[in-house]
Image (cartoon, helix red, strand yellow):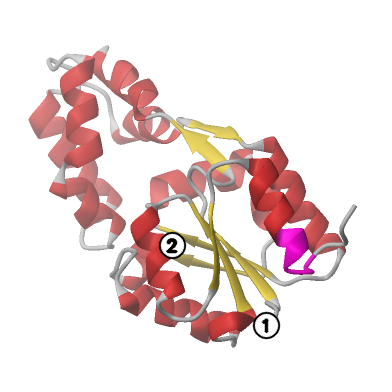
Amino acid sequence: MKLPEVAVFDLGKVLVDFDYSIAARRIAARSTMPPTDIQKFIDHSPILVRYETGLMSREEFYSEIRAITGFLGDIEEFGSFFADIFSPMDEMIRLHAQLREHRVPTFIFSNTNDLAISHIRRNFPFFANFDDYVLSYEHGAMKPHAKLYEVVERVTAKRGAQILYLDDRPENAEAGVSRGWHVIQHHDPAASIRRVKELELLPKD
């Protein structure tokens, strides 16, 4: 079996947890729409998809949300409410640090937006310690679209089994499998760490 040479991490639910209900409650306190409706809108709106594929600017996204929810604050207040929803997943952050210590190149591969990334860069120091970042809003596509996986292969200069990819969502993981990548569908830190060691990217205990 060919072993991986680089590790590619999804961000949300792999390295940081997130909860849109936090944003919904804060936005609702300054809006005419209740928190449950705002959360449904944030979670499932095609507006968020447009924002996370780079088809809408931060200002346009804010304007759309303000028009729909009646939000009374300015764009800075909205941005702080919308983006401050993350918490560290410490075991996985430690795993990443161990990979760096063993000189394994690491990359972020995420469906996300510029508000979220700006917040994470400011508040999570580990985020600076990757070789590169493939972010949906910068490339006009979202996982599991093949275009974004091609960007990963170009950025890492690796293909197939040279790549280890960790992602929590089955459709994203399967898109990696279809390209011959080693894939860990992440649910449990202990299981993911064990598999990384089985693939010889870290020494076994």
Q: Is residue 192 left or right of residue 111?
A: right
- Residue extending furthest toward the front: 1
**Circle 1 sits in a helix, a strand or a loop, which is it?**
loop
At label 2, which amino acid type do we have?
A: Ala
Mark 1 lies on residue: 1
Q: Which one is earlier in the sequence, the residue at label 1 or at label 2?
A: 1
Q: Amino acid at mark 1?
A: Met
Q: Is residue 95 visible?
A: yes
Magenta-highlighted residues: 196-201
Q: Nearer the viewer, residue 51 or 1?
A: 1
User: Disc count in the image?
Assistant: 2
Label at residue 128: none
How far across and down, in percent of the image, does residue 70 sit? Answer: 12, 23
Q: Judge by depth and name the residue closer to the eye, 135 or 8.
A: 8
Q: Dot 1, crowdedness within 10 Å: few (<14), some or many (≥20)?
A: few
Judge by depth and name the residue closer to the eye, 17 or 123. Answer: 17
**Image height of 79 relative to 166, above or below:** above
At horizontal 38% and vertical 70% (from top left) the residue drawn is: 175
Q: CA distance from mark 1 to mark 2?
A: 19 Å
Along the viewing direction, whichever of 108 and 178 lies nearer the viewer: 178
Residue 30 showing in the rendered view:
no
Q: Is residue 203 magenta?
A: no
In the figure, is residue 128 to the left or right of 117? right
Taking the spot 53% from the left edge, 76% from the top edge, the residue there is: 181
Q: Decide: marks 1, 2 in contact (CB < 8 A)?
A: no
In the image, is residue 49 above or below residue 119? below
Task: Quickly name the residue at label 2.
Answer: 173
Q: Is residue 198 magenta?
A: yes
Q: Is residue 109 above or below residue 4?
A: above
Label 2 residue SS: helix
In the figure, residue 178 lies in which quadrant?
Answer: bottom left
